[in-house]
Image (cartoon, rainbow, N blue to C red):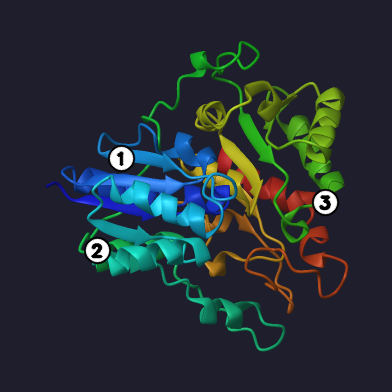
Amino acid sequence: MKDHLLIIRFSALGDVAMAVPVVASLARQYPDLRVTVLSKPFARVLFEGLAPNVGFMAADVKKEYAGLRGMNALYRRLVAKNITAVADFHNILRSNYLRLRFNLGRFRVAHIDKHRRGKQLLTRCNDKVMVQQPTAFKNYLDVLARLGYTVEPTFISVFPPEGGNLRLLPNIIGEKKKFQQWIGIAPFAAHKGKIYPVENMEKVIAQLIQRHPSCRIFLFGGGGKEKTVLDGWVRKYSNCLNASAVLGSLKKELILMSHLNVMISMDSGNMHLASLTATPVVSVWGATHPFAGFMGWRQNPDNAIGLNLPCRPCSVYGNKPCLRGDYACLKNISPEMILEKVMKVIG
């Protein structure tokens, strides 16, 4: 029977996206290994078509597989797939329970080490230990190595070198002209500690247009207040387009990202999505820090912007209230600092 590896990773978009380079590299270096990725339904687009031996299984753990009964039903479905080994890339209550069941069934099982102690020392209030923690990519690779799959991370992009097929996108996107700079801006994140002030980001937009009058700026963001802000910029600046509203799917957003000259993003899922298309990202870091291990795949650390403040970083995920109360780590980043990084990337 062919080896069949189950990889478990629920969580948010960015965390799941960081598994893509590792899974792609694994699949190519072990072509006889069957791989099934278990994640939330939204992640299907990231793994389908990644490699011939990679499959995807969606699990809505809050509805269809909620509670203990749901987890047991999910376990039975997984066992029916003839799994031979389990790589838990998440290490939370739900994946721990599945891991327990597989352990009792005498399967080969390994789970991620999140290096929580190092992150605690990095983000504590006083006497911070500013040491680079192992990246999420390294942590995933270590899980595979413990199962006997040593992987050399060779992934570059989910698309061929020429990028995704622009003809699959709405006509409003059009073809990219040789003289144009295509710039992406993803100004939002899940938590306030990671969001650059929108009034300052608008200044970045205005200065970009002033320096590159022929540039096109594609905006990425969700609904509600985010859409209101993005649509306001679109009305004010003819160079701007609310790409997320026009495209309407993650797959199409990835295609567009693959043709950007640069993406300006927070420490957020969009940083990781752009990284999967080999697009350089100028990333803005407030309460969080690349030392926690969540920099985008193969991104240049020189393109990460963050202030040296004694209180920073105060959080691994940006979800803690500001100790100072003023979010100086974000508000004190000038638009010119972002613009300078962008200019170094696009010339």
Label 2 residue SS: loop
Which-is-in-front pick, marks 3 and 2? 2
Q: Earlier in the sequence, mark 2 or mark 1?
A: 1
Left or right of 178? Residue 53 is: left
Measured as percent of width and height from the top left, residue 148 is found at 20, 63
Label 3 is placed on what type of residue?
A: Pro
Q: Specify whether 133 is left or right of 88.
A: right
Whether tag 1 and tag 3 are in contact, CB under 8 A, the answer is no
- Rendered view: 52 above or below 271: above
Q: Residues within 10 Å of mark 2 (few under 14, many from 20)?
A: some
Instruction: Work out whether residue 37 or residue 118 is closer to the camera in this orientation and state it.
Output: 37
- Which residue carries the number 2 mark? 107
Disc 1 is placed on an element classified as: strand
Is 255 situated above or below 194? above
The percent coordinates of residue 129 (x first, y second) are 58, 84
Residue 198 sits in which quadrant? top right
Q: Earlier in the sequence, mark 3 or mark 2?
A: 2
- The residue nearer to you, when weighing 320 against 9, is 9
Which residue carries the number 3 mark? 197
x, y percentage for residue 153? 31, 53
Q: Residue at x 26, y 64 (%)?
A: 105
Quadrant containing the C terminus in the rendered view: top right
Q: How far across and how far down the image is residue 264, in percent?
A: 65, 43
* Mark 3 burial class by Cα count in 10 Å: few <14, some 14-19, many 20+: some
Q: Residues within 10 Å of mark 1 (few under 14, many from 20)?
A: many
Q: Amino acid at mark 2?
A: Phe
Relative to residue 83, is residue 286 drawn left or right? right
> What's the CA distance linking mark 1 and mark 3?
40 Å
For the point 83% across and 36% down, the residue is 229
First reached walking from the N terminus: tag 1 or tag 3:
1
Distance CA(mark 2)–CA(mark 1): 20 Å
The residue identified by callout 1 is 54
